[in-house]
Image: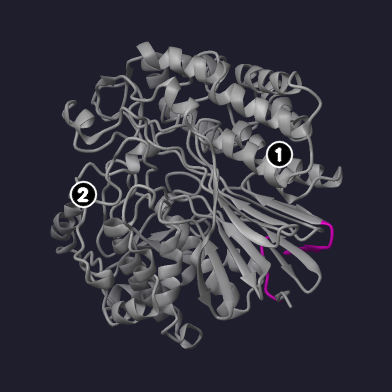
Amino acid sequence: MMPQGSTFTTRPQLAGTFGMVASTHWLASAAGMAVLEKGGNAFDAAVAAGLVLQVVEPHLNGPGGEVPIIGYDAGQSEVFVLDGQGPAPLAATPEAFGALGLDLVPGSGLLPACVPAAFGTWMLLLAAHGRLRLREVMEYAIGYARGGYPVVPGISAGIASVAGAFREHWPSSAEIYLADGVPAPGARLANPVLAATYQRLLDEAEAAGPGREAQIEAARRAFYQGFVAEAIGAYLEHAEVMDVTGERHRALLAADDLAGWRAGAEPPVTGEYVGLTVCKTGPWGQGPVFLQQLALLAGFDLAAMGRADYIHTVVECAKLAFADREAWYGDPRAADVPLAALLSAGYAAQRRGLVGPAASPDLRPGRPAGAEPRLPGYAAGVAAELAVTAGWTGEPVTVLSEPDGPGLAGDRSSGSGFAKPGLAGSVPAGDTCHLDAADRFGNVVTATPSGGWLQSSPVVPGLGFCLGTRAQMFTLTPGLANTLAPGKRPRTTLSPTLVLRGGEPYLAFGTPGGDQQDQWSLAFFLNHVHYGMNLQEAIDAPAFHTTHFPSSFHPRTSFPLAVDVEERAGAGVIARLGELGHRVTVRPPWSLGRVSAVARDGGFLYAAANPRGMQGYAVGR
């Protein structure tokens, strides 16, 4: 049975029999629950919640972004993955960036835009696995976009940080987000232009006739081949905008790139751990690092360790798995990824021997099936950073202020921004959302929407939303699995998790946080399976992560030996980590991670959400 727990938590683990929705924003969770109440299933609820997140967390995701989804369809008795990651434009080549004098794909502006995949992926989920009509799941997002929603502090801070840059360089963004100045926390903010876009998509859908599937397909077509694609194409044909390089650049994306793309389904990549089957995306996402970490950790008695030794072991295994990510991961449709070898027990046993009693300062990818690893050019920064580390005394550093933003605590690299001195304002990194849903029919779904952040790319005139910047995750170093190529998916960080027990769905969870996603969610999972914590206890437990390996976001920096730990871990644990050679940064008590989760066990449904960031909520009955 799901442990009920006896220790204090910030809120209860929810338990019921009808349905559960958990997400990074209470309005999205409530919208999903409303859909369950009117007869929808978990997939309908997820679509409604996902579209609401595009409105109420515009600093964290949008229609121009992406959304990997993992679900279990009880009617089909199988797990599916919707890739939800748009590919690079056909004009995007390393040579195109080289001609601009760039050795990294920028983290902001129009150059890093891939095909916007979020809307098409939500439509595929609704058509293939939902039961309600488009209007019944879309009306909540339209209502909040038209009538307004309460501004959370992260939106205010994000807009304030870019206000000058918006006014000077991205006027289409200023029209939406600075119409009445920087919105204060708690103020009511509407996006009537986005509301009109959603409404027209719905109108064109319903004009296609009474059939549910025909309406959904008509909406998808209106986005990728109709008025949305036309507006994007017309804007990008002439727009030259300022980005992180301090120069103005035009996009490589074109309307034809949207017309040629359609979301698709594929099987999950799986691994076994303590009698459970863990389902992740393929290596076009970082999801398999979760499985690699589990394979490494399977050789340790984690439950018997003291807390510092446990964190040390988990961090050292993370370093090894993420080093393999840098060397080997990429879109398997366009590159040879030795995934079977990377996930094999023999490979894990070989790599496990590298975990020693002291923190390793090195980035050490392995040799799956004997292949020689290569790293992207920016990974040379790991060695360069060691010069900084050499003078470290071993004393932990305490960060007294809140970190960069909800879910990005400790991610010292900016995923976007204007770097040129003298610009009025800077663009901080965007981030990500997450949602999970389970219903009384046996369906479970987990999704991690992201991209299309208001801070990273200008609003497309007439549409009310931004394009994404996910191409920044490609490398321009030739010959690697994640080297930029036309029509190829970038190796994303977005990483939901679904767990089976005895072939049935047991647990679904995830978190925002870029490179930290498969660290924070791993710690949650280990808290649950090894320490008997219920979902809320596992979420509330003190969190930690490492930034030892290169960031997936521009400018791809790394911090060798770095470990961020919430202060609640305790002075003794923190001191011991320093003695083991980790460069510890002590973070505020409730600052790392934004995990949410749902579960099915013993005839009950369960849910929990993160108190960090003061946004996430679970609802259910």
Residue shown at 29% from the left, 33% from the top: 106
Q: Is residue 13 magenta?
A: yes
Residue 547 on image: x %, y %: 33, 58
Q: Amino acid at mark 1?
A: Ala
Q: Residues within 10 Å of mark 1 (few under 14, many from 20)?
A: many
In this rendering, position of residue 338 left or right of residue 39: left
Q: Is residue 367 magenta?
A: no
**Circles 2 and 1: CB atoms closer than 8 Å:** no
Q: Quadrant of the N terminus?
A: bottom right
Residue shown at 17% from the left, 31% from the top: 98
> Would you name the residue on which mark 2 appears?
479
In this rendering, position of residue 542 left or right of residue 334: right
Q: Secondary structure at mark 2?
A: loop
Magenta span of residues: 6-18
> Would you name the residue on which mark 1 appears?
48
Residue 512 on image: x %, y %: 51, 50
Q: 486 or 84, which is in the foreground? A: 486
